[in-house]
Amino acid sequence: MQQQLQAVWEQLRIDLCGVQDTAALVQIRVAYLGKKGKVTELLKGLQAVPAEQKKTIGQLINDLKRRAEESIAQTQERLAAEELERKVLSAEKYDVSLPSTEKKGSYHPITLVQRELEDIFHSMGFTVEDFPEIVDDFACFEALNIPKHHPARDMQDTYYLSNGQLLKTHTSAAQNSIMRKYGAPLRAIFPGRCFRNESTDASHENTFFQMEGMMIDKDISISNLIYFMKTMLSEVFQRDVSVRLRPGFFPFVEPGFELDVNCQICGGTGCPSCKHSGWLELCPCGMIHPNVLRYGGIDPDEYTGFAFGLGLTRLAMMKYGVSDIRDFNSGDLASLAQFTAK
Ligand code: FA5
């Protein structure tokens, strides 16, 4: 008898696995639990069982009936869930091959200029490095030959965090770690966002992008620096742009220079973007100070190098004729939509 019960149970499991719709499930219910169903017939057959086995067999049949009811109910739930899923899928018909009716997105102009520069420098053998926005005092100042209380710290109004770290004020903050990572010789650029607590105007933001570059090798000289700066600017602008080089002071370079570009907004006649000077400070640079090489683990008697800190946001202003730097952070999608990659 027990074998018979087991066989009914196994057959029910098989039947339930294959069921695909509610009508078929109703038939199964009738076939097992209906008046003439297999389980009901087993209960009827209990009369013929010897009296001493009746209780045990009766319990087994009732247990089978309970399990059959539970399994049928679970199958009902499965079918209902499958039906719902079918309805949802048929309501959302996707044709992935259809052309989009939505407006195409576009890259932010700073991203475009950054990528263009990365390509240019990559083709000249430079690697592109990433660096965090939160740094410590050593990276941002001390490793750059700017000890505590040095007046040069006042040139950059720093946002300090409560844990003593700070938001990097310039991409030069990565110089030391990149020197230590690669040693000499090295060629690297490292773009990044910088933060300064200063008042904003047409050419100053408190959050802006720079792209730092370093080249360190034997016999690197100012001529190498000028060559790379010229190549970079002529490739970016793809037109003749006047630049001027003048002495500039930065504790981490010696000698240091300011590289200004002729204002592309007014053509050099003077406007708010260039503070009516006709020139915009774009890319300070210089020969890396021996102390900075030393801090980076590089022997200044053997190696020399140049570094530059290009104002990436200002370069985007000049390239795309954006007269106010604050427009870049305005989030104005209509104005951003006009920029598309080459
Ligand atoms: C520096 O930040 C130096 N670390 C650059 C450097 C690197 C010099 C390596 C020598 C060697 P400076 O503070 O001038 O320098 O900033 C560099 C450039 O970033 C500026 O010429 C300008 O183009 C851009 N810049 C600076 N401040 C702002 C600002 N508030 N808003 C937008 N662009 C800015």
Image (tube, helix red, strand yellow):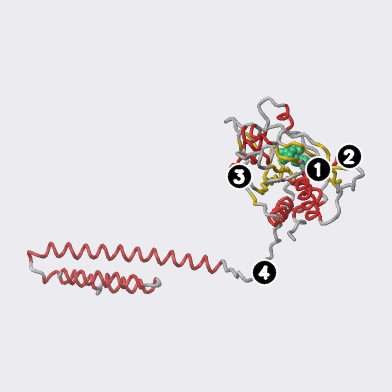
Callout 1 amino acid: Leu
The answer to whether the residues at label 2 and label 4 have Cβ atoms under 8 Å apart is: no
Q: Identify the mark nearer the N-term, 3 or 1.
A: 3
Taking the image as drawn, is residue 100 in sight? yes
Q: Tell me the crowding category of disc 2: few under 14, some 14 to 19, or many 20 or more residues within 10 angstroms, Cα based.
A: some
Q: Nearer the viewer, mark 3 or mark 4?
A: 3
Q: Tell me the crowding category of disc 4: few under 14, some 14 to 19, or many 20 or more residues within 10 angstroms, Cα based.
A: few
Q: Identify the mark nearer the N-term, 1 or 4.
A: 4
The answer to which of 52 and 192 lies nearer the viewer is 192
Q: Measure how far apart labels 2 and 3 are at the Cα level.
A: 41 Å
The answer to whether the residues at label 3 and label 4 have Cβ atoms under 8 Å apart is: no
The answer to whether the residues at label 3 and label 1 have Cβ atoms under 8 Å apart is: no
Instruction: Write the residue at 17% across / 71% down.
Output: 3
Q: Which mark is residue 325?
A: none
Instruction: Write the residue at 75% across / 61% down.
Output: 342
Relative vertical location of residue 238 with respect to residue 263 in this rendering, above or below: below
Quadrant field for ligand 1 = top right
Q: Measure how far apart labels 3 and 1 are at the Cα level.
A: 27 Å
Q: Is mark 1 within 8 Å of ligand 1?
A: yes
Q: Measure how far apart labels 1 and 2 are at the Cα level.
A: 14 Å
Residue topped by disc 2: 277
Residue topped by disc 4: 99
Callout 2 amino acid: Ser
Percent from the top left, x then y, of residue 84? 47, 65
Q: Identify the mark nearer the N-term, 2 or 3.
A: 3
Residue topped by disc 1: 259
Q: Measure how far apart labels 2 and 4 are at the Cα level.
A: 49 Å
Considering the numbered disc 1 on the image, is that residue within a helix, a strand or a loop? strand
Percent from the top left, x then y, of residue 294? 63, 36
Residue topped by disc 3: 183
Relative vertical location of residue 254 with respect to residue 94 in this rendering, above or below: above
